[in-house]
């Protein structure tokens, strides 16, 4: 199996939507742009939040198995994907890429 590098590329924060729809919370996402993780054997890396993992697990598993070319040529690098976590108030976009050892 291949390793898959997971890099936080962009983090948005929609305070206008939070004010209208979200109950106040004391702790949100700890990730920052540029944070990177490596998945070994298609497993969730230590420190990556469960919500983000739930959004990307299928793609990480496929890349780890050597699969790629999602959606018939969607990405310039066929062994990569751009996936966002499912937090609608503060989504983080992640670049997933198969890496060679």
Image (cartoon, grey):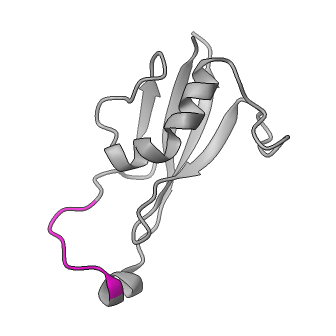
Could you tell me which residue is drawn at 68 percent across and 18 percent down? 66
The relative height of residue 67 versus residue 51 in the rendered view (above or below) is above
Given residues 7 and 49, the one toward you in this image is 49
Q: Which residues are magenta?
A: 21-28
Is residue 27 inside the magenta stretch? Answer: yes
Where, by quadrant of the figure, is residue 40 drawn? top left
Left or right, residue 92 beside residue 78: left
Left or right, residue 69 beside residue 98: right
Is most of the magenta stretch helix, strand or loop?
Answer: loop
Left or right, residue 54 beside residue 58: left
Could you tell me which residue is drawn at 62 percent across and 14 percent down? 100
The N terminus lies in which quarter of the figure? Answer: top right
Could you tell me which residue is drawn at 28 percent across and 53 percent down? 30
The relative height of residue 24 versus residue 56 in the rendered view (above or below) is below
The C terminus lies in which quarter of the figure? Answer: top right
Residue 10 image position (x, y, % from top left): 51, 57
Left or right, residue 27 beside residue 47: left
Could you tell me which residue is drawn at 52 percent across and 29 percent down? 5
Residue 54 image position (x, y, % from top left): 43, 44
The relative height of residue 43 versus residue 90 in the rendered view (above or below) is above
Residue 94 image position (x, y, % from top left): 53, 47
- Find the residue positioned furthest to the right: 72
- Find the residue positioned furthest to the left: 26
Residue 23 image position (x, y, % from top left): 22, 79
Mark count? 0
């Amino acid at each position: 199996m291949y390793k898959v590098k997971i890099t936080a590329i962009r983090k948005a924060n929609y305070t206008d939507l939070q004010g209208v729809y979200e109950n106040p919370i004391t702790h949100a996402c700890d990730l920052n742009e540029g944070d990177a993780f490596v998945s070994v054997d298609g497993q969730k890396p230590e420190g990556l939040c469960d919500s983000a993992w739930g959004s990307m697990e299928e793609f990480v598993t496929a890349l780890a198995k050597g699969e790629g070319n999602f959606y018939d040529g969607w990405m310039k690098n066929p062994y990569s994907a751009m996936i966002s976590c499912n937090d609608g108030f503060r989504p983080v976009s992640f670049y997933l890429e198969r890496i060679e050892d």
